[in-house]
Image (spheres, grey):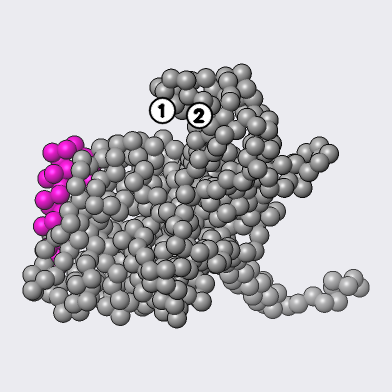
Amino acid sequence: MSFAHSFRLPASRNAKAVCVALVLLVASAVISSFHRQPRAWLAAETPVAFWAWRNQTPGPADVREAIDKTKARTIFLRAGQIDLEDGKLRRIRPVTGPLPQELDLHLVYNATRSLLAQLEQVDETALAEAISAAYQADTVRAAREQARVPGLQIDIDVPTRLLGRYAKILRALRTHLKPGTQLSITGLPTWVQSSELRTTLTQVDFWVPQLYGAVIPERSDQSIPISSLQSIARFVIEARDLEKPFYAGLSAYSCAILYDSSGSLISLRGDMDPRAIASDQNLELIDQRPFEPQTTQGSAIGSEWRYVYRARATGVIDELAMHTGDVLVLDVPNAESLRLSARAVRELAGESLLGICVFRLPTVEDPATLTIAQVAAALSDCDSRAEVEIRFLPDAQSSSVKHATPPTWILTVKNVGTASATIETVKVDLLITPGTTESLTTHESASVEYLCTAAGAANLINLEPCSQRRANVIRFKPRTLMSGQALMARLAMNLNSSTVIPVLIEMQTDTGQQYLDRREVAVECKVKP
């Protein structure tokens, strides 16, 4: 008797066993399918959009650069705000300037503080009519300017408890729109906890959850970034599970938060220039570090950076008044943090993803935002890299003065890479012949040191401070050198067009890596385009 025969089951029992096995197999497949990671999007196939959030439309050059470098297809353009004053709803602060014509525009309307404060009492139909009236007027303008406007977006930071009321406003608004008009909304991270979110989303064609800015640190000792990989991953999964088409909203802007000397929140700004803050002599840098110091891929840090300044005295910077002892905390993103955020979206969003929407569209007038080169590199999943360009150019002013002794030259130091230097870590050493330099004049955002190599030293080690006359090393120290930033200094020195100056460049980047480069820089006899 075989082993198999000794354990043979009756036919009926055998069939039952087979059925049970099939049920378990199907259940296992369902469970496996439920937990299976969605197909990851390739960087090249992920559509790119931007929010444009200024009172002036972006210039043609900025739009063209965004299209060329990121293949952007869509701009969500803030077209104005809906305000409530004396019981009357009206659109204020309409966007000015020519509308971009080369891509799709979704006109965005957000709410003023006054409207948000009274949102619970506002008539839903009246608000829908006010939004519709603004949109209809803007579509007439767009048609006149030959701009493509497929729809509108509502950006109202509705409290989570009022999502049901928001759904009624959107339902009323839909009745005023022409068939085929795309209606979308932005979304707060807190909304995903509400059972009413699904009902609200049924009123729109798609939405754009903002995967950033969920919590504002109310005290200076709280270290909370604009966005983090952990929160982005969680929000993307929650958005995916709603099975509603969405763009993933990612941040590319810096935020400045002012606290009083006791650490209490005073104000928040998202439009201040990090370079101007770092260069202000009234602000003392007391701390700088990444929000999330864990490393990814070797030693690179994929985190926003936190810079903390203390006001030495009462003063004003960019219309922000500060008192002695006030603390200004600056949250600065980098290309690496955006790159890892975009990768998390592509890996977790699944088939409901419509693309990635970046806040804000980089423009030459907006130094608080990453450059378009940084955004393009991040969305293409390219590592951040450091690269510094050094040039010695003839000074046009001195060339017009006869018999200028000695001649003056313009030293230009430009960060042409996508990684920025951290504050006060940049050193540019010029190796010169002693006695050939009369002066190096810099902007207040940089300093100069005259140094001599130690006796008998064959390289730049054990440098010692010395007089300008004896110096064989001039150290140029910009306080900042962010991606795209160029700094200049005026160098009075006996040079000619055949001179080659050895230069050593050193800085710590915002990826946590050291940049060190030594090169020979030829003096240029004339300015090149």
Residue 220 location, x and y as percent?
47, 75
Query: Can you identify the residue that label 2 sits on?
Result: 408
Contact between marks 1 and 2 (CB within 8 A): the answer is yes
Q: How many marks?
A: 2
As measured in the structure, the alpha-carbon distance from the residue carrying label 1 to the one carrying label 2 is 9 Å
Q: Amino acid at mark 2?
A: Thr
At horizontal 12% and vertical 52% (from top left) the residue drawn is: 136
Instruction: Choose between 498 and 400: the one closer to the eye.
Output: 400
Give the magenta range. 126-151
Considering the image in quadrants, where does the C terminus appear? top left
In-image side of 353 versus 119 (left or right): right
User: Residue 397 — which label?
Assistant: 1
Q: Which secondary structure dominates the residues rendered in magenta?
A: helix
Picture residue at 14% right of the left edge, 60% below the top: 91
Residue at the location (69% across, 78% down)? 13
Give me the residue at 30% from left, 36% from top: 60
Residue 289, x across and y down, in percent: 58, 63
Instruction: Report the front residue among 450 and 201.
Output: 450
Give above or below for 459 relative to 288: above
